[in-house]
Structures are given as structure tokens and as C-alpha cells.
Amino acid sequence: AQKVTQAQTEISVVEKEDVTLDCVYETRDTTYYLFWYKQPPSGELVFLIRRNSFDEQNEISGRYSWNFQKSTSSFNFTITASQVVDSAVYFCALSEGIQGAQKLVFGQGTRLTINP
Amino acid sequence: DAGVIQSPRHEVTEMGQEVTLRCKPISGHDYLFWYRQTMMRGLELLIYFNNNVPIDDSGMPEDRFSAKMPNASFSTLKIQPSEPRDSAVYFCASSLLAGIQETQYFGPGTRLLVL
């Protein structure tokens, strides 16, 4: 069965620090997709990134970067020079299968607090 | 472009009452999903539709819950009768085309409190 583990329940850092959110997943499929979503205090879920199992290239988008390592089944998310607006709950999610079923399995989330 | 629209944003009701949550997916998306978020269970998928047809409702907690999608631009999630343990945030999401690679875009959620 597929599973996503975000071992860090809460992280608190001071503004401008770098912070890494960990995500470890379990799946028996060779084809799968990984996602990160952000849930700010306002409550909506905002899509950040999607990565497929065949593409292990790291991705950078501004202050955000993602490190995908199949060898350790991890898909970690780093925020560089954090800002107060980055404060949110961040969810890692996994979907698997060839076609049809689009079930997303979410981790429990990491609550990130950036202090000024 | 408008995102996924949900209404109401907040709902407070008394135990035993019927609750109806509404969702309008992103235009052109052919998959629609209903999720529930609670502190205890996190985010869990309740049901999803493809081209208005329910595909998998294995996450629906019990018969008190029902969902419909009468057309491509509207879906409802109904709880009858409601119970305090149904208190949660209910999200609707939609995606385009088939396959696991498509990104699901979420609505703002409906925060339900059953007293």
C-alpha cells in the first residue's frame, strides 16, 4: 500500500534561514507521481510542484527547490532565505498507477512557522 | 480563470440536520474529487468522478454521505443526518484529463461544524 511520511510535525525558524521539509514515500509501483501542496493560514490548498518517478532531476523555482531521490524514496523540499509569508502547512502527496485512478495519498503535513 | 469554487465557505448546523456542500470545478476539467480534512485523519479522499460518473466511492465513511454530479460544472456532497464527528474541512478538487500525472487543483474548502 502506498504511504507518505512527513516526520517533521512542526518546524520553526527565524526569517532568512534556510529550511528543508522531509518527505518519504512507499509504493510498489514503478510509475508514480509526487506532489507538494501548501496550505496557508487562510486554509486553501495551493499546488506547488509535480514530479514523476522517471525524472530525478532536482527542480528550483525561485527560493523553492526540490530534491527527488528514488534510492531513498524521498522528495524533500527546501525553502531558501525563508520569509514570514512562507508560514503554512506543507503537504507531500503521492499518486500511483498507470491510468485511471488518480488517488492522492497525503502525508500528515509539516507546519512551518517563520518568525520575524 | 476561475479556480474551483465551493460553497458555503462555512457551515454550522445541529446534529441530525441535512448538510449540502457544493462545488463548481474548473471549466474543462473532467475529474472531480471530494476530500475531507480532520486533525485525526488528515486529508482523505472520499469519492471522485470522471465525466460526471462516480468512479471510486470507497472513501465515503458511511451511508449518511452521498455525492452527485448532475453535470460537468456542478457537484454536491450531502450528509444526512449530520453528526458532530462529521465536523471537518471538506475540499473539492478538479483535474484535467485522465491519468495519475494530472495535477489536482483544490477549492478553498468548506469548514463544517456540527453541534
Image: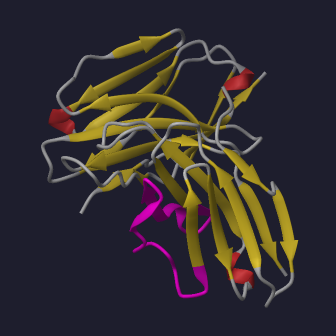
Q: Is residue A34 above or below residue A83?
A: below
Examine the image and state in which quarter residue B101 appears. top left
Indicate the position of residue B77 as horizontal and vertical percent values: 63, 68
x 32%, y 29%: residue: A51
Total numbered badges shown on the rendered structure: 0
x 54%, y 18%: residue: A18
Q: Quadrant of the N terminus of chain A?
A: bottom left
Residue A37 shown left or right of residue A39 in the figure? left
x 69%, y 85%: residue: B80
- Closer to us: A60 or A29: A29
Q: Quadrant of the C terminus of chain A?
A: top right
Indicate the position of residue A85 as horizontal and vertical percent values: 73, 24
x 23%, y 42%: residue: A32
Residue A59 shown left or right of residue B59 in the figure? left
- Whether B112 is among the magenta residues is no
Q: Which residues are drawn in magenta?
A: B36-65
Q: Is residue B29 above or below residue B31?
A: above
Indicate the position of residue A41 as horizontal and vertical percent values: 75, 41
Q: Is residue B65 above or below residue A49?
A: below
- Closer to us: A86 or B52: B52
Examine the image and state in which quarter residue B27 appears. top right
